[in-house]
Structures are given as structure tokens and as C-alpha cells.
Image: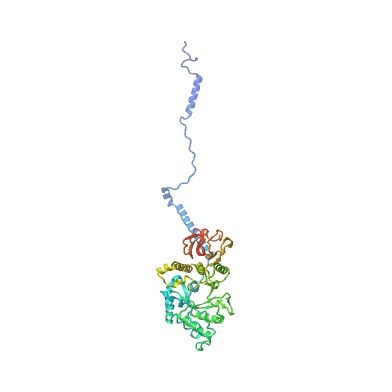
Amino acid sequence: MPLNADGERGYGSVNAGSGAGLAGNLGRAETVPLLMPEPEPEPEPFRWKPLSKEELELIAGGPGWNKFRSRLVLLFWVCWLVMLGAAIAIIVQSPRPVAPQLHWWEKEVFYRLQPALLMDSEGRAVGGFEVMREKLPYLKSLGVGALILEGFFPKGISPSNLTEMSHSIGTMPQFQKLLTESHQKDMKILLDLCNLDVLNEQGPMNNTEGLSDSSGYIQYSLKFWLEQGVSGFGICDTDATYSEKILMKWRALLQEFSEVDNERILVVRETTDSFVMTNASSGGVNATLVELVTRPLLPPSAHPLSAVEVATAVEENLQTPRTQWPSWTVGGPVSPELQRIVMVLLMTLPGTPVVSDGEEVSPAQNTTVNATEISVQGEGKKWRSALSLFQSLSTTRAREEALLFGTFTFLPFNASSSSSPTPPLAYLRSWGCVHFLVLLNLGSEPHPLSPDWAPSLPEGGVFVTSTKMERLGAVSLETLNMLPQEAIVIKLFESGSFA
């Protein structure tokens, strides 16, 4: 067997082709890296992150930060001043009601009484100024600010003794003491001259005082009582002898004794429907020469007025357009069930309320009875409730501008929506954003408020008072149900506020 086996395929031989291929493979293997490199990460998008404490301390003291901070502070103050100026401009330019300066007779509650009919603490009808002095704290607690004394002069008095009072009610020293104590309690006292036909008589001749007739002597008498400290006088519209010439003299005399906090006034009580305030001396009274004209809310009647009659008279008075509201008295008699409703009317209508003795509470209000008598009579609860109602109304009127000089808006009900022959009555007293809603149900059936009755009114409010004295807390007009023969006073407010 030949040793040279280069040309042959055999054991241990290497194919050239194979060798060449191997060499090629080895050459290529040297150029390929053994470890594949990882791909480079893509750049992350920019994200803002707060500065660290070290970075902030490094930048805080730099000039760029100081400049930015000063501009930021300047921008804050500029914005604050702009907002303050805008607020002031809105407040100055926005219309707002201006509270009028009221005289004392426009703010007080007047009370007419006859001293001779007053009772003492034991219920005896002794009358007189001494009993009146005992009653002053009681009347003041009710909110009364002025007293008009009736029956002060004896009937049939002549001009020669108009400076004298009726002996049945007291003496001059007692009356002076009464005036002193009433002034201490900030209460006014006026003298009623109604039904005194004194101008048709001739008084004594006294050229020294310039009293050539009864008119001159009355001037002297009025001056006498003004010097004692009375705050004015009351006359009736039936006295046609009070001509404009006479009233001008009286007015000059009253102004002579008037003070800043105690102006002297003249009150005219209207007793007839034909009475007209005029500006000429044609039998009427010049409206510019008197301070108060009291008008009856209800017509005179020989019998207590029914609910329908009261509702008709009240609605007629409420719907009458007026430039100036008079002061009100009750006028005709009403049933006991409607007395409190009429009292709510007097105290919430525009004008000065004038209440007569016995109208604000039951006729037994002047007597002081013990607990046993109250329980036996069964009138103690009603008596105290009536006192509470009157006191609540007078207190609310004294502190609420809306009830003193606010606007008046009559809110009619749809009569077809009520089956009662006497549909409820309602009106609104408003001043600024404060509204008082007065609801009157004189009928004998309950009456719920319809949601679409007055859509412009706020939905909620709070009870101020009611004739039943049982209404307390917040109220929603949508769920309110008026009871029979009930009057309600509500202070309205917008949703979420307590104005």
C-alpha cells in the first residue's frame, strides 16, 4: 500500500475544498463578535420634576429667583387692588334704599284710653292719674309709646275754664307727676279735644292776653297745657269750626314749643267716610297743618262685623292706591275670633297704629287676677296669649325697617282656587333685601298655599308671629297651610341665607 496518499482520499486526509471552506469559516468567525451588544436605550421624554432641597438652596439665592419673586409679589398686589377697586365701584354705583328720618310719632304705637275707666290693682274701677302711673310700666312693656287721654276735660266745658280738667280723674299735681314719670319712660301724652264745642262760645274779654274771642282763649289754654309738658292734641273731623286759619295759629304755637326729640303734634281722628283732607278751608282739614290722620280700618256698625264684611273692607283698603298712608284704628266692632287678625293688620300696615283701650287684649286686661281665678274663668291662657301677640308685633315693628317705612305690595289670591267665601289676603312689606309676608285667613276653612301663587317670592322663611302664637322656626311656603281665622307674619329669606 503506497505511503504517499496525498492524492487520495483516505484516513487522515483533509479535503482542500473542505480545508478552504474551513479556513473561510474561521476567517469569518474572527470578525463576528462573541457577545452581542445590547441595544442603546431610547432617550426618555422630558419630564418636569420639583427641585430637591439642595438644588433649591442653590438657586434660591440667585439673581433670577429674586427677580421672579419680586414680580410675583407685585402681580399679587396689583390684582388685589384691582379687585378692591372693582368692589368699591360696584357698591358705590349700585342703587340702595336710603332710610328716611322718621319723627317720633311715625315710630311709636299710640294708645287711646280714658283715665276714668281704669281699674286699680284689685280690680276696682276707681280710675284717675294714680292708676295711670301704675299702668305706665305695663303699657311700656307692651311697646306703647304715646297715650291719648280721652275724657280729660268735663263735658260742656266753656273757654273760660279750658285750663281745668275733670275732677273725677285727679288733680293738677297728680297730672304733673304723671307727665314727669311718662317722660322718664320716654312716653308721650296727648290730650283729646274731640266733641268739645268750645269755639262757638264767647270767652272772657282779656285785652292783656289778646284774647278777644273764644279762639284766642283756646290759644292761651293750649299754651298752658304745652307748658305743662303735653306732646300734642287730638281733634275730630266732625268739628268744622277748626278752620284753616285756626289750625295755622295752632301749628305756629306747637312749633314754638317743639324740641328736637319732642316735637308737638296735632292728630285728627276721622269718624266719617265723607271726610276729605283738603288744602283749602272748605270745611275740611288742611293736610299740611296736621301730623297724623287716623282712619278706621273697618266701617262703623251696630253689630260685630262678620268675616266676609271684614275681609271686604280690608281688601278695599289694601287695594286703594295711596301716596301717603294714614294711621289706622280698628273702627267698627268685630267678633272675638277676628280681633287678633285686625290687630296684626294695624301693626303691619304702613302708617302709625292707634289702638284703643281694650282692643289689644280682652276687656279684662286692666285687672290683675290670681292663678285660681284664671283657672276658674278659663280666660287666663287667651289673655296672656293676646298680650304676647301684641308685644311681639310692637317689638318687631320697632326694630324692623321694613315694617316702619318699607314698601307695600298687595298679593291677591285667585278666588276660584278657594272654596271659601272669604279667600285669604296677603301683602308684602319690603325694605332692601328684607321682606315680611303677612297672610290673613279670615275664613272658617284651612287654606294651603299654592306653589304657583307668588312664584317671585323666596321659597323659605322664618315665623315671626301668628294669632295662634304656635308658629315657630323655619317654614317653606310650599308646605304652609293656613288655619281658619289665622294671621301669620313671616320673614322671608333666599335659599341658603338668613337675611
User: Can you name the residue that lies furthest to the front here?
Assistant: 376
Any part of residue 217 in sight = yes
Quarter holding residue 302:
bottom right
Any part of residue 499 in sight = no
Residue 246 versus residue 89 in the image, above or below:
below
Q: Which residue is nearer to you in this view: 195 or 89?
A: 195
Q: What x and y, as percent, mark residue 23?
A: 49, 23
Residue 467 versus residue 148 in the image, above or below:
above
Residue 156 versus residue 22 in the image, above or below:
below
Colour mapping used in the image: rainbow
Q: What x and y, as percent, mark residue 365?
A: 45, 71
* Residue pictured at 58% horizontal, 63% vertical: 415
Q: Which residue is nearer to you in this view: 398 or 327?
A: 327
Residue 444 versus residue 61 in the image, above or below:
below
* Residue pictured at 41% horizontal, 48% vertical: 53
Q: Which residue is nearer to you in this view: 354 or 342?
A: 342
Q: What x and y, as percent, mark residue 165?
A: 46, 82
* Residue pictured at 52% horizontal, 87% vertical: 203
Q: How many dots with numbers?
A: 0
Q: What x and y, as percent, mark residue 146?
A: 47, 74
